[in-house]
Amino acid sequence: MNSVISNNEIAGQFPILKQPVHQDKRLVYLDSAATAQKPLAVIQSMNAFYEHTNANIHRGIHALAEAATEAYENARTKTARFIGVADARQLIFTRNTTESINLIAYTWGRKFLNKGDLVVLTEMEHHSNLVPWYMLAEEKELRIEFVRVRDDGTLDMRHYHDLLEKKPRLVSFTHMSNVLGTINPAKEMIQDAHRAGAVVVIDGAQAVPHFGVNLTDLEPDFYAFSGHKMCGPTGIGVLYGKMDLLNAMPPFMGGGDMIKKVTFEGFSTNDVPYKFEAGTPAIAEGIGMGAAVDYLESVGMDAVFAHEQELTQYAFNVLADVKGLRIIGPGADVRGGVISFTLEGIHPHDVAQILDSEGIAVRAGHHCAMPLHQRFNIPATTRASLYLYNTKADLDALRKGLDKVIEIFA
Amino acid sequence: MDDFYREIILDHYKNPAYKGKLESSDYEFEDENPLCGDHLHIELKTDDKGVITDAKFDGHGCAISMASADMLLETLIGKTIEDVKQLSKQDILDLLGIELSPVRLKCALLSLKVAKAAAYEMEEAHDDLVE
């Protein structure tokens, strides 16, 4: 299938991609799994907010306050619809995926998990879906077990089912790995976990930006993702939760907006989602998130995914005969556009530095997934990650850059 | 760039003279740079006057961290433990002779941090050792 994304047209909508690096090198941005670049429409939506609409929300009576509140809530509605959620009240705006997962641990976890309860995670989680649970486990004396990752970078489903037999209270896993590119069979895993009686948290940071996600179909209990990896601004993220769970949870931070009434004796909490949104939120960023949703919908998530699949296949072909190169994770046909690799005898930092000198931005290190790197017995990898604005020319440039790396270290 | 991976740095990285283990050592320390997973172990052997008679490093990391360790140990033979304590960031930069970004600076200075922590016989190394 030919990609419906016309590369030049899409890349042209991202101002930063027109800017050379190191004086005269074309920027080849292959670090979208860390953060995505922003289209002009998103940048302009935030500028327009500050130029024409800026006011605090949910409190003023004046014209600007009403317009700002409407724009912010409109962004929430759009984002809910984008992930197949009819009731926008089920979306809590947070700073990012990390804060969303911490919110679950601090509120639901503290109230409903007890000493000895089992939490099931996987070996492919990044630090933000590990450390909040480690912290909670220490406080509440919980047990944590990890679903094994097989050598091909997929989860060991037999092991997953064995762990479910132990009746975990909570199962939390990534929809798509930020290192391996593995897309986990979320729907089936959620159904299995529910049958075992567990509450399910999905880390969707690498999923929502890259393919259509429908939570009405998936039915997780909680789902977390970030704006900045989906062409939106930094500082805004989402936590989706099932209404009965959100209602039963205590508030997260205390302050304005999360209360109904405050007296000298105490306070009563506001309704969902405001109960979890204390203080002035990231208003412009929320609106930027809404613009990012509009942008991605205008391209179409099926087209985004098809484009990335085509590029991933192309990347595998282009990298196939690079001497000493080993890609970690599944084959090109069953993964997203995240390609982590090692080059024999050359440290990823050196790879990244030489690629950078050619204008190619990749990530080097453990990508906030140290345990997963331990699992594969490698201290670090180089990661090239793709998005809708990347082209085959970007991957040809990567190949040329790697040839230079090998030449220098030969 | 071609400057960054100077021949001398690549040479120390590919053919390190001081990589390995000592049969016995008087000072040793190991640490990592969590940002990139570099790991470095340095051992120093001294005579009764505190003069360094042999040194080895072991570990894994990028060309900058490994070359800087090899170059540093080369200069330490014949120096005293007190001399190691006096080493500064600038000494390492002079050895490498390249400009480094803040991230790569951590790679370059790992050897200094580990060598000084060894000399001070520390339990745990701190970043202010390499200021």
Image (cartoon, rainbow, N blue to C red):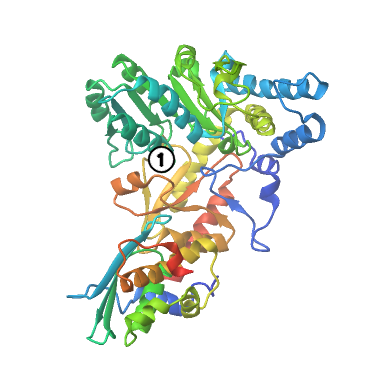
> Residue B44: where, in percent of width, then height?
27, 77
Q: Residue furthest top?
A: A244
B108 lies left or right of A306? left
Residue occupying the point 56% across, 40% down: A387
Q: Residue furthest front?
A: A264
Depth check, front residue: A77 or A260: A260
- Amino acid identity at mark 1: His
Q: Is residue B95 above or below residue A406?
A: below
Instruction: Please rate how many residues cluster around mark 1, counting C-alpha atoms within 10 Å: few if below 14, some from 14 to 19, many from 20.
Output: many
B40 lies left or right of B104? left
| Quadrant of the image occupied by residue A6 | top right
Q: Is residue A84 visible?
A: no
Count of residue discs: 1
Q: Is residue A141 above or below residue B14?
A: above
> Residue A353: where, in percent of width, then height?
51, 62
Residue occupying the point 41% across, 58% down: A322
| Quadrant of the image occupied by residue A39 | top right
| Quadrant of the image occupied by residue A347 | bottom left
Disc 1 chain ID: A
Residue occupying the point 58% across, 35% down: A230
Depth check, front residue: A220 or A328: A220
> If the image is split into quadrants, where does the C terminus of chain A sit?
bottom left
Q: Is residue A78 visible?
A: yes
Depth check, front residue: A192 or A327: A192
Q: Is residue A408 above or below residue A52?
A: below
Determine whether the residue tagged by mark 1 lies in a helix, strand or loop.
loop
> Residue A262: where, in percent of width, then height?
60, 17
> Residue A28: where, in percent of width, then height?
59, 52
Q: Which residue is mark 1?
A: A126
